[in-house]
Image (cartoon, helix red, strand yellow):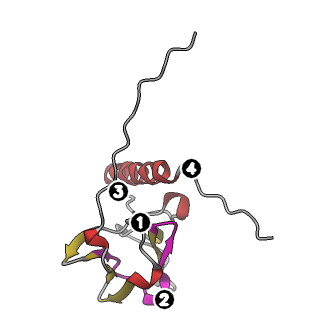
Amino acid sequence: MTPKRFTNPFHGVMDMITEMNRVSDAMASIETGHAGHRERGYADAWSPPTDILARGADLIIRCEVPGVYEEDVSVSLSHGVLTISGERRRDEEGTVVHYSSERFMGAFRREIGLPDGIAESDIEADYGEGLLEVVVRGAANAAAPKRISVARRKRRS
């Protein structure tokens, strides 16, 4: 018997909190001059700048990840969520003092909800010159979400 897999019920909330923490850190770093000073993990990963656009029937996702090696980038699909993750590493061996460090280092992650019915075979990714491009075939023509009516709750006596 395979073990039951649980999903994170706070998935969307955690992404919002991560983004709010990133903005807060960026504002604090402007005041203190310590931008990108500490290493980050998945709990507070930075999010690369991302464009999402349609080209014909395809959805195109472009992430700027300069300074990240191809082998340090991962693209995965799970339960309709495309995850782009990886790590930007420091490569200054022997460096003792950083006079300025404004680039984020460490882990990054970006999660994008895809329309229902997208399979792994519908997704292609390529990387070059610091730009990751993910093509999701047929995703731009997906049906809009269906609205669910909300009924007034009956008063409890």
Q: Which residue is mark 1?
A: 116
Query: Distance from label 3 to label 2 (Cα)?
Result: 31 Å
Residue kind at label 3, given as amino acid type: Gly
> Which label's residue is closer to the chain start, 4 or 2?
4
Q: Are marks 3 and 1 in contact (CB under 8 Å)?
A: no
Mark 2 Cα within 10 Å, few/some/many (few <14, many 20+)? few
Q: Quadrant of residue 67?
A: bottom left
Q: Which residue is mark 3?
A: 33
Q: Quadrant of residue 68?
A: bottom left
> Which label's residue is closer to the chain start, 2 or 1?
2
> Which label's residue is closer to the chain start, 1 or 4?
4
Task: From the top left corner, tell me how far across and down residue 58 is, in percent.
Answer: 26, 78
Q: Is residue 71 magenta?
A: yes
Point out which mark residue 9 bears. Answer: 4
Which residue is rendered at x = 39% and y = 64% of the image? 47
Residue kind at label 1, given as amino acid type: Asp
Circle 1: element type: loop
Q: Which residues are magenta?
A: 60-81
Residue kind at label 4, given as amino acid type: Pro
Q: Horizontal placement of 155 versus 66: left or right? A: right
Q: Which residue is mark 2?
A: 71
